[in-house]
Amino acid sequence: LRSIGGMWTSGGNMSNHVAIAVALASALPEVRVNGLVDISERPVVVLASGVEHFSYLGAAQVMGLGSAGMLWTAPTEDHTSDVDSIAAALETPPHGTRPFMVVGVAGNCRTTGIDDLNALANLCEKHKVWFHVDACHGGSLLFSNRLRKQISGIERADSISLDPHKGLFVTYPSSYLLVRDPSKFAVFSRYADKVSNPNCMDLGLITPFYGSRGFDSLRLWAVIKHMGRAGISTLIESRQETFNQLRAMLENLGFFTMLGTSEFYRCAFVFCPKSVEMLISELITFPELRDSVRMIISLHTKQLCEQLYKSGEVVFDLFSLHDLRDVMGCGTKYKFDVMGMSVGHAAIDTVDQKKIAKQITILAEQQTKQLVDELVLLKDGIYPEVVMTTSSGPAGW
């Protein structure tokens, strides 16, 4: 890491916090001495709404930029950053603001959509703005000769956050922030002149934010040492094939509708059986019923997810997501509760895949009857009582 700058952190949350700090110090070095009080224009981070990780808003609030330090732009229908929207924000930012950082996403945490990183890099170069790529999910693709083209342009970033505990088969915690110019990063060290000194092994002297600590990279080092680049590439490509098989299985079961396009190892979907699609299509022709349809679909998606989790056989994540492509026909303004499938294993054999499909089918068929009953009531003008709660994951996370 000495040649590119960077450090181990406890997670993508912290890596993104540090990235903002480094970008801000690079754009406005006086902030490190005088703080934000003397800055005539509010420094803002530019990123797409609904695509970003929660850590950016949290970092802005903690670091004194405030919630207003986020300049939100539009997402695309594929849950990626809209390049034209970001371009407009950089060309004509709100009065009194100064964009100092653009966040590109290499695999968002909902559908793993990947931004056009080269286009974003071009914008940042044009406007002389720090380009950060959140590759906490997608960074693992760098190890695959076949798949790494999906994140072309990442090499042009000023900083990158990458989580081996998400995509490189190591346990929590393991994240890295990589910075292209070590001097931008070194200013936070106790002894900046020692950062590039190979003879300085005391991390407390050169590693900012954490100070003295142990060999936290040991697990990743062991994986790389044992598997090698070629071995890790094989695992990543095998995992992608496994994901493709399981996604096809979910689609073929006929119980789910996918929301967004998934680039790798993760997809999002709602419980919407083929047998009720015609009924839903009829209901959504009445605008006043669309929100009720959305709420009913969300409720049963959540119930099925929790039943699968409690069965101990199948675990999906549970979160909320805008249907930006309006696949369900209920509009894009409000979110659905959705299930998310993340495939961490490099291989799941045919026997286990059949067991997964069987368990889903058993519980989904039971849930289908309840869903149909509520939709029929809605068609008859009777609004079922739908109690919506905040999605927090099947384990109550």
Image: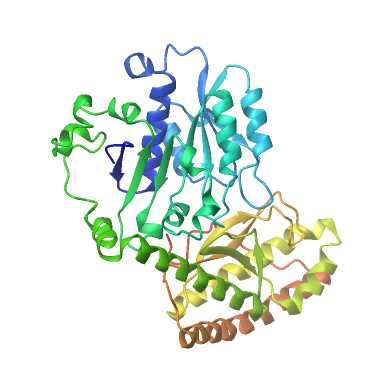
Which quadrant does the C terminus fall into?
bottom left
Residue 154: horizontal and vertical position, in percent? 49, 43
Q: Nearer the viewer, residue 180 or 136?
A: 180
Give the answer, above or below, for where 227 lies relative to 218.
Answer: below
Is residue 381 among the parts visible in the rendering? Answer: no
Q: How is the image coloured?
A: rainbow
**Residue at coordinates 30% horizontally, 45% vertically from top-left?**
9
Give the answer, above or below, for where 96 lies relative to 184.
Answer: above
Residue 85: horizontal and vertical position, in percent? 67, 35
- Relative horizontal placement of residue 208, taking residue 67 as reference (left or right): left
**Residue at coordinates 45% horizontally, 32% vertically from top-left?**
60
Residue 90: horizontal and vertical position, in percent? 61, 26
Tell me where residue 299 sits by quadrant.
bottom right
- Relative horizontal placement of residue 63, taking residue 133 as reference (left or right): left
Is residue 43 among the parts visible in the rendering? Answer: yes
Give the answer, above or below, for where 212 lies relative to 300.
Answer: above
**So how many labels did they put on this image?**
0
**Residue at coordinates 57% horizontally, 24% vertically from top-left?**
127
Q: Nearer the viewer, residue 388 or 156?
A: 156
- Relative horizontal placement of residue 239, taking residue 282 as reference (left or right): left
Tell me where residue 37 sits by quadrant.
top left
Residue 172: horizontal and vertical position, in percent? 31, 58
Which quadrant does the N terminus fall into?
top left
**Residue at coordinates 46% horizontally, 56% vertically from top-left?**
141
- Relative horizontal placement of residue 231, taking residue 112 as reference (left or right): left
